Amino acid sequence: MMEADHEDGSYDRNKELKLLDETKAGVKGLVDAGLTKLPKIFVHDGHKVNISSSSSATNVSIPVIDLGSLHEEGNSRHEIIQKVKDAGEKWGFFQVVNRDFPPCVLDEMLVGCVDFMTKMLRDTFSCLLAPGPIDRHQLPSICRDVTIKYLDNVKKLALTPLEIRIALGGIRPRKQLP
């Protein structure tokens, strides 16, 4: 990859990005080429960041919200919804724990992916996973069942913030979200 530095020491980040993009190799291509020094386009210019030196900025922690009892009626559900509202207003994001996504599904999906990658070396596939229903027969048999189970859980997890937003708006959904 060419250097976008000029004799006068100026640096043209856009030119460097364009050069990298034109190689179509990406970061993997840089690594494969034996890159020994991190290109400037990946180095953050620290002097451009406005970091507050106040003590409150050093003790910052991202809100963590436990969704474990979200689907139970009562105070805990109301508390979770309130925590999401507060985190959204103050931070714009939060970390989710106990998301009702069984760890065994993640483990099975990893095994299914490894099985597919190691045993189906010549096969490739393409299928639509959204917005309509999944055609099971488009998925390879070696990982079909676990992929469906995984996608069902991902869909449920993806709808959780929508369900919380609906509750925050005081709207009662006409039907239960899938």
Image (cartoon, rainbow, N blue to C red):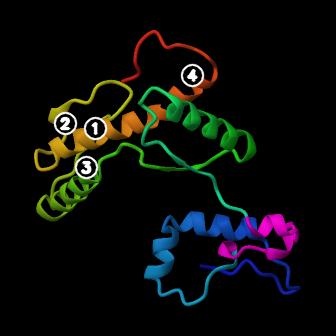
Q: Between tags 2 and 4, which lies in front?
A: 4
Of 62 and 74, nearer the camera is 74
Start and end of the magenta stretch? 41-59
In the drawing, does residue 128 fall left or right of residue 92?
Answer: left
Q: Which residue is mark 1?
A: 127
Q: Which disc is residue 166 wearing?
A: 4
Tag 2 near tag 4, CB within 8 Å: no
| Image location (x, y in percent) of residue 39 | 64, 80
Q: Secondary structure at mark 4?
A: helix
Relative to 127, say whether 61 is above or below: below
Amino acid type of disc 3? Val
Q: Quadrant of residue 136?
A: top left
Residue where numbered disc 2 is placed: 138
Asked if 115 appears above or below 165 in the picture, the reply is below
Q: Amino acid at mark 1?
A: Cys
The answer for how far apart the CA atoms under marks 3 and 2 are is 20 Å
Relative to 50, does residue 3 appear above or below in the rendering?
A: below
Q: Magenta includes 160?
A: no
| Kind of residue at badge 2 | Gln
